[in-house]
Amino acid sequence: MALITGITGQDGAYLAEYLLNLNYEVHGIKRRTSLFNTDRIDHLYQDPHIKDRHFILHHGDLTDSMNLTRIIQEVQPDEIYNLAAMSHVAVSFDMPEYTANADGIGTLRILEAVRLLGLTQKTRIYQASTSELYGLVQEVPQKETTPFYPRSPYAVAKLYAYWITVNYREAYNIHASNGILFNHESPNRGETFVTRKITRATAHIALNMQDKLYLGNLSAQRDWGHAKDYIKAMHLILQQDTPDDYVIATGITTTVRDFVKIAFAECGLTITFNGEAEHEEGFLSDINTNIFKEKVGNDYLKEITKRIGESIVVVDPKYFRPTEVELLIGDPYKSKKILGWEPEYDLPALVKDMVEADLHLFKKDALLKAEGFRVMNYFE
Ligand code: NDP
Ligand code: GDR
């Protein structure tokens, strides 16, 4: 039986589905919201009136110790996956105190609940640690022994969570492990993370529903993998006899600029960049009409053709962070050797999956728009 915090998020949803397929009883903690926020897990929903359900949601919050303790007492989980977090690095500069509370102390609350409830020998704990811990480059590629140098309130909060997990493991002999996961994305990625922002904009621009894509630091380099691969590593980590900490990464890094090029190329569009840092722009320089027709559809070809030579990607310094993490590239040697973990997706396959999903999503919107309905076209 597993308990997942952050079950409504990208990773929580994929992990819940994965564990259900392994015949787990899955419990999840979701926040009370004024509108439903369960889009990513609606396909897993089971009517609460059904007996012998395998998918059960509880209202809760990482900032509420008593609530967490009660849920853990009720569920008595064999495995806890602590995935809940205020996970947006840029937003953590606006909400540093809340981020510390949820992402840092929230982890302590879970560990302490397990200790107080006498579950230290029953319940295994996975802590969602992050490559953001490495921050300012100390060594590349980054591995389990690379020193940390966090560069945001988010990363500092996650540093506390990392070490309190290690401390409870050593002090109380809890099976508690950190997965130091590098960036992982999917069609379910939150819309304001850079990859999804790019794939959404690619689809919108190709479908003639958006003029420009505004981005921040195009030179940042990230080691991007697919969330579907990474949640399998979380499960593997908790199946080991001995708790430990593992880097999960692809070992390949790519700039944001190149991610943009690859995403647009998926629709047959070539983007050429010029200018520097604050004034850099990406121009639509060519169209492969065969790919465009096949992926996007002939109806939109005339509109996009008119835009050759136009600037489509523009840097807006408002997206720059007060302190940036410039380069992440992970060394997955240990996780491959000990966990036997192997990712199935490479970057082109990830981008293809995301662009195709967004094209599918927004073709429906384009149809609604053509019929005169108002469609949501919100982006940050
Ligand atoms: P998401 O932002 O997609 O999901 C975060 C989840 O946490 C959501 O379910 C959210 O609920 C929930 N949540 C946020 N604050 C609270 C709170 N105070 N109490 C309870 N629940 C809360 O993140 P991901 O799925 O991408 O990431 C999962 C975890 O892994 C996070 O901890 C993240 O920091 C970490 N991580 C992610 C990486 C990535 O590349 N994706 C890489 C390394 C680490 P709601 O839906 O209501 O907002
Ligand atoms: P990150 O992901 O900060 O690495 O954290 P994000 O996608 O937000 O940024 C990646 C890089 O792209 C640059 N960038 C932009 N970022 C956003 N969001 N929006 C923009 O317009 C933009 N333009 C350029 C950023 O400056 C950055 O360098 C993610 C989260 O999932 C964390 O929770 C997780 O811990 C880490 O990945 C690993």
Image (cartoon, rainbow, N blue to C red):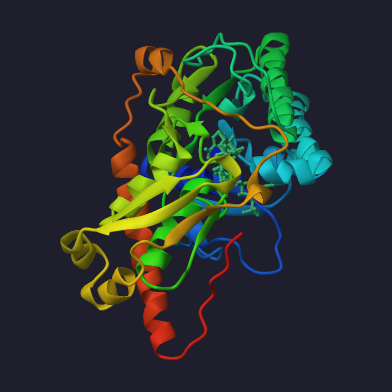
The single residue placed furthest to the left in the displayed view is 290
Picture coordinates of residue 40, whole percent (x, y): 49, 57
Picture coordinates of residue 187, whole percent (x, y): 41, 53
Query: Relative to 352, does residue 89 appear above or below in the rendering?
Result: above
Q: In the picture provided, is 194 more to the left or to the right than 254?
A: right
The single residue placed furthest to the bottom in the displayed view is 372
Q: Is residue 267 visible?
A: no
Q: Which residue is found at the position 33% from the left and 64% from the top?
A: 308
Q: Is residue 96 visible?
A: yes
Which of the two residues, 138 or 167, is positioned nearer the viewer here? 138
Rendering quadrant holding ligand 1: top right
Picture coordinates of residue 300, whole percent (x, y): 29, 75
Q: In the picture provided, is 65 more to the left or to the right than 351?
A: right
Query: Relative to 271, does residue 364 appear above or below in the rendering?
Result: below
Q: Which residue is found at the position 36% from the left and 68% from the top?
A: 307
Q: In the picture provided, is 347 more to the left or to the right than 56?
A: left
Which of the two residues, 304 or 37, is positioned nearer the viewer here? 304
Picture coordinates of residue 292, whole percent (x, y): 23, 63
Which of the two residues, 167 or 259, is positioned nearer the viewer here? 259
| Placement of the C terminus among the 4 image quadrants | bottom right
Q: In the picture provided, is 164 more to the left or to the right than 255?
A: right
Q: Which residue is found at the position 53% from the left and 25% from the top?
A: 179
